[in-house]
Amino acid sequence: MELHISKNPRAVAEDFATFLVDLNKNSDKLNIALSGGSTPQLLFDVLAADYKKAIDWSKMHFYWGDERCVPPTDKDSNYGMAKAHLFDKVGIPEANIHRILGENEPRQEAQRHSHEIKKNVTSSDGLPRFDLVILGLGTDGHTASIFPDQMELLKATETCVVATHPESGQKRISLSGSVINNAKSIAFLVTGESKQPKVREILKHRGKFRTYPASHIKPANGVLYWFLDEAASA
């Protein structure tokens, strides 16, 4: 595991952007699963403003670690956020964007998107192997859309699974824990004081850390990165 601590959310975005530039330079093609949330949104803004010419976007193929089952124009759409803050600004080829069709029936879409991933992403040990999976951390310890009351999704053999938000009941489509842990690199981007208690328990193996899905993200044959700001790492 590699731990990166930066002063504030903007500095975290800058640190990760530098990491992504290096990855881009040393690769012919990158299959990346993106995350939603405020920290990735800031990252997308930084990439679009300051790194547009530093990255060969034609090498990058984008997927999502999870998506809400809403149309792409909905304010909750992770794809919609990435499109507005990154894709429309840097000229990524349309063929390189592999969105989850959140407007479709969830189980059918999970199957359809699983086939698309398997068709485009190289497999290893019988599972797709992403070059990079970007994750966030919820205040309840969830990651992607794997929640504490649905821990079975960590071991699911499917590529994509259907999850249910425990409070809103909203359906979501998520990569399974098995596919996430098969990635070459996994990067948590976590900022803010509200995340500090869970970060502490997970990284120090304290309290109820085993009940948090994020604690079980451990790449089988890859590298795990945590990019934190000072507030989250305090």
Image (tube, rainbow, N blue to C red):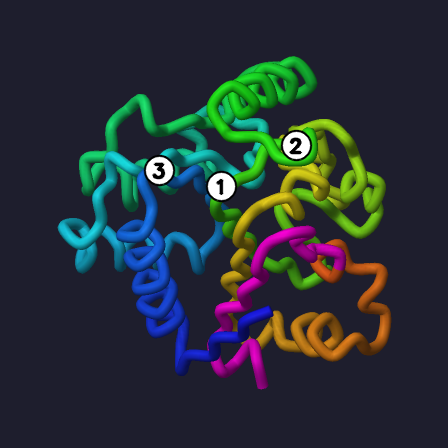
Q: Which quarter of the picture shows residue 75?
A: top left
Name the residue beneath numbered marker 1: 33
Q: Looking at the image, which residue is at 75% across and 56% down?
A: 216
Quick one: 72 or 150, which is closer to the camera?
150
Q: Looking at the image, which residue is at 52% across and 58% down?
A: 187
Quick one: 100 or 156, which is closer to the camera?
156
76 is within the stretch colored magenta: no
Start-end of magenta stretch? 216-234
Position of residue 66 measured from the top left corner of the image (x, y, whole percent): 57, 38
Of the numbered discs in the image, which one, if any, rests on residue 57?
none
Name the residue beneath numbered marker 3: 29
Quick one: label 2, few (<14), some, or many (20+) residues within 10 Å?
Answer: many
Q: Looking at the image, which residue is at 48% across and 44% down?
A: 131
Name the residue beneath numbered marker 2: 127
Q: Is residue 135 above or below residue 154?
A: below
Q: Is residue 28 above or below residue 232?
A: above
Q: Amino acid at mark 1?
A: Ala
